[in-house]
Amino acid sequence: MNNEKKFRIGVLGSGKGSNFVAIADACAQGKIPAEIAVVISDVAEAGILARARERGLRAEFISPGKFRTKLDDDAERAFIDTLQNAKVDLIVLAGFMRILKGEFLRVFANRVINIHPSLLPAFPGLESWKQALDYGVKFTGCTVHFVDQGVDTGPIIAQQTVPVLAGDTPESLHVRIQKAEWELFPEAVGALARGEVQVQGRQTIWKPAQA
Ligand code: GAR
């Protein structure tokens, strides 16, 4: 055991939490050299909170306030305070379905990442697997990116392709994309926790740490 401070992750999610589970399990198995300091949801009954509590992790519901697609000022402050009190080094959006802007991104500049279920910049926004199917692409996938002031526009950290197969439904395609997400997201979070990813403008550069 060394006494080095462990890299601390805050996770935000609104849904069932399968990406959170992939990351939490990778932390528990030592594949990501980090610990999950807190999990926050804007949805009181979200599965992600239950999955976190099952693992003995701190899990909090914070009411998002009066808006449908973003946090109101009080909620944004509460999210920021909770994450700062938990001393997080990185904030991981794992199916967090509200747009974060302004003060939140100023406080945590270059420390917020998101998983998106398409190969950005194609199909930003909601139900990207359905957008891909409707468009008729033969490949889609998932993207891990830094969060900036735009919607799904920040510098790309990692991507994985997923084929669209004959007979796919939105549901079957989403399942295949999620399986790719469970591989890609822990890999990207691990690289960030090891300090192997640098951002230069829109470019992110992966430099494996020297053994
Ligand atoms: C994931 O597929 C993620 O890509 C998507 O929400 C799902 C959350 O699933 N995120 C977005 O669409 C963000 N715009 P999970 O709760 O099982 O991890």
Image (cartoon, rainbow, N blue to C red):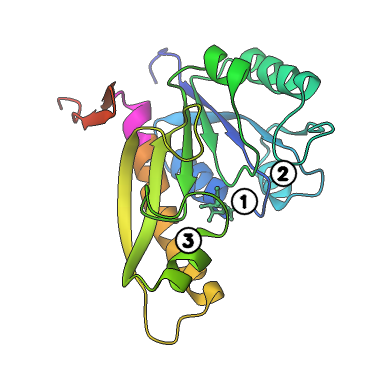
Q: Closest to the observer: 145 or 22?
A: 145
Secondary structure predominantly adopted by residues drawn in magenta: helix
Q: Which residue is mark 2?
A: 49
* Magenta-drawn stretch contains 191: yes
Residue drawn at (37%, 59%) of the image: 141
Mark number displayed over residue 150: none
Residue at the extreme left: 210
Where is residue 71 shown, x and y percent of the image? 73, 30
Q: Which residue is mark 3?
A: 178
Q: Secondary structure at mark 1?
A: loop
The crowding category of the residue bearing disc 2, from other C-alpha atoms within 10 Å (few below 14, some 14 to 19, many at least 20), is many
Real-space CA distance between mark 3 and mark 1, rounded to the nearest whole angstrom: 11 Å
The crowding category of the residue bearing disc 3, from other C-alpha atoms within 10 Å (few below 14, some 14 to 19, many at least 20), is some
Q: Is residue 144 above or below residue 88?
A: below
Does the residue tagged 3 have its C-beta within 8 Å of any atom of ligand 1? yes
Real-space CA distance between mark 2 and mark 1, rounded to the nearest whole angstrom: 8 Å
Q: Secondary structure at mark 2?
A: helix
Q: Is residue 210 visible?
A: yes
Sooner in the amino-acid sequence: mark 2 or mark 3:
2
Q: Amino acid at mark 3?
A: Gln
Q: Secondary structure at mark 3?
A: helix
Closest to the camera, between mark 2 and mark 3, is 3
Q: Which residue is mark 1?
A: 17
Q: Closest to the observer: 37 or 103?
A: 103
Which residues are the magenta region? 190-195
